[in-house]
Every structure is written in C-alpha cells, then in structure tokens.
Amino acid sequence: MVTITVLDENDNSPQFDITSDSAVNVAEDSAIGRRIAVVLARDPDAGSNGQVTFSLTSGNIGTVFEIRTTNNTYGEVFVGRPLDRELLDHYTLKIQASDSGVPPRRKEHALRVNILDVNDNPPIIGNPFGYNVSVNENVGGGSAVAQVRATDRDVGLNSVLSYYITQGNDDLIFRMDRVTGEIATRPSPPDREQQNFYRLVVTVEDEGNPSLSLSG
C-alpha cells in the first residue's frame, strides 16, 4: 500500500461573492463607527493559503472609511471620519481581498458609496451687508425696489428657498415675492411725510425638515 498526500499550493485567488455590496447610500451625518457595507470573499486553498484579509487600496479620500476582516471571509466597511456631501458626494472604493499565501494572491472589488444630503447648511444671503435703495414717494404700486438673492449649499428640497419680510413692514407698504425674493410696493405707495425711512428685515428659509433660515 502506498499513501500519497497531496500538498496544497496557493493556486487559487480569493473570489468575491455575488452578494457583496457594490453600491450603497450613506447619509452625510452618519455616526463614526457605523457599518455601511459588507463584502464576502472565499479562497478554496487550505491553511494560510485560503485565509482572506481585506484592505482599501484606493478611493478612500481623506481616509474617511475603514475595513475590518471577520472570520477570514467577510470585509466590513465602517465610517471612520465625519462625512460632508458638500465636499465630496460619492466615493469609489477599491477593496482588495488577499490570501496569506507566499506569495499572496489578490482580487479587487469596486464599491461605490453615495453620500446623501442632510439639511446642514442654512441659506446664505448674497449681500451680507444688506441692501440700500431709494424710492420716490409717488412711485406706482407694484414697482420693484430691490431683489434679495440667497443660495444654499444643500441639494433638493434642502436647497429650495422662500423669502419673507419679517420686520419693518407694519403698514404693509411693501410685499415680497416668496420665490424670487423681489421686494415691490403695494398699491398704496410710500408717503415720505408719514415715514421717510424703512428698515426691512428679510428671512430666507429652506424647505428642509427641519428647515434652516437666515435673517438679514
């Protein structure tokens, strides 16, 4: 009787399973330490030749993500640093699965991480020092006197803005277009003999939930 033992050679590379995440959506206010994705890779070799570890080889700008290996099979991706969609709205991570053979064999897998917007930016009024305008007292009703312009770094409803006059218009001489930010006279024009100066406070509010606003 002759017993022949066939020894393992590191002739197989790790293979990513079809169930591995390839695209995920992550809110920009996700807590550090939150798990956002899981990949799975197996290697049919024996011993250390079949033990898989995972690493992030590219795309991890600012090192905001971390990957940990579990049971030499699973790679778990976590948030490692604060995210900011306004700085970067997506990442394309290259995940490498490497066995422990000598030399090791490797395989790569792409994971796209889309950063979802959170309403974390208030509106910004284009002229932070205010608007100074002069109006004739006999100007007709509906005459435009100024237009307030504002922007918001968020996207979607979080960046949709509404404009309101919140102070200084007690006699309702002026009206403001909620969408465009234009201030115009109402049918009863200003009367200098009754009041020769108005200081209007305008509030700009976004449509986020909860909404953010700025007055000026």
Image (cartoon, rainbow, N blue to C red):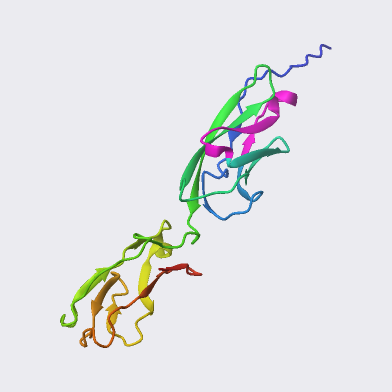
Q: Residue furthest front?
A: 193
- Decide if residue 171 is on the left or right side of residue 116: left
Q: Is residue 67 visible?
A: yes
**Residue 25 drawn above or below residue 96:** below
Q: Which residues are magenta?
A: 40-63
In magenta stretch: residue 120: no
Residue at the (23%, 83%) spot, across then down: 192
Q: Quadrant of the C terminus?
A: bottom left
Q: Is residue 60 visible?
A: no
Image spot of residue 1 (x, y percent): 84, 12
Q: Which residue is more in the foreground, 135 or 18?
A: 135
Residue at the (58%, 48%) spot, across then down: 82
Image spot of residue 46 (x, y percent): 73, 25
Q: Which residue is more in the foreground, 159 or 56?
A: 159
- Decide if residue 155 is on the left or right side of residue 63: left
Q: Which residue is more in the foreground, 54 or 58?
A: 58
Q: Residue furthest top?
A: 2
Residue at the (61%, 22%) spot, across then down: 105
Q: How many marks?
A: 0
- Decide if residue 104 is on the left or right side of residue 28: right
Image spot of residue 54 (x, y percent): 64, 33
- Decide if residue 5 is on the left or right side of residue 161: right
Q: Which residue is more in the foreground, 63 or 52?
A: 63
**Residue 9 drawn above or below residue 71:** above
